Image: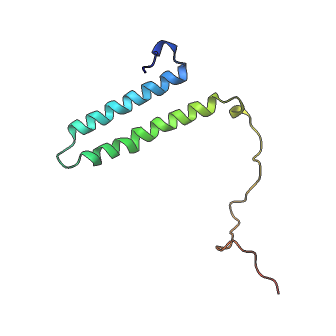
Amino acid sequence: MGLDFDRLSAEELLAAESAILTMRSLMEAARDAPHGHGMSCLETVIEGQGFEHLRKLLTTAAASHEGAQKKGSAVCHVPAEKQLRSNGANPRRS
């Protein structure tokens, strides 16, 4: 089953383009990697371009959701300075 690229949405075309560019970088890294360092070179590409590809997909998907553009306060405020006990228990009272 193949994709009909003429029927893809703008978001899908962006995802396809990003995936193709990432794949090209992976294939170039595999081709140019020194003997015994192929996997390391491929992992380096994934850490950079692979994660960037996923970030683009995530951002595009979130922005396309109708409720994603709503702004407002957080559901519940959690102060960053409050330190909880490591065991999660409340102090004991005698």
User: In the picture, residue 49 is in which quadrant?
Assistant: top left
Is 2 located above or below residue 75 in the figure? above
Is 45 located above or below residue 92 in the figure? above
User: Residue 59: horizontal and vertical position, in percent?
Assistant: 57, 34
Is 30 located above or below residue 60 in the figure? below
Residue extending farthest bottom: 94
Q: Is residue 66 left or right of residue 38?
A: right
Residue extending farthest front: 1
Q: Depth check: give the residue in front, 12 or 68.
A: 12
Residue extending farthest right: 94
Residue shown at 59% from the left, 32% from the top: 61
Residue shown at 55% from the left, 19% from the top: 9
Q: How is the image coloured?
A: rainbow
Numbered disc total: 0
Is 69 located above or below residue 36 in the figure? above
Q: From the image, which quarter does the C terminus lie in?
A: bottom right
User: Residue 32: horizontal and vertical position, in percent?
Assistant: 21, 38
Q: Is residue 92 left or right of residue 86?
A: right
User: Residue 52: horizontal and vertical position, in percent?
Assistant: 46, 38
Q: Depth check: give the residue in front, 7 or 15.
A: 7
Q: From the image, which quarter does the N terminus lie in?
A: top left
Residue shown at 22% from the left, 36% from the top: 31
Q: Is residue 26 left or right of residue 87?
A: left
Residue shown at 75% from the left, 75% from the top: 90
Residue extending farthest top: 6
Q: Is residue 87 left or right of residue 72?
A: left
User: Residue 92: horizontal and vertical position, in percent?
Assistant: 77, 82
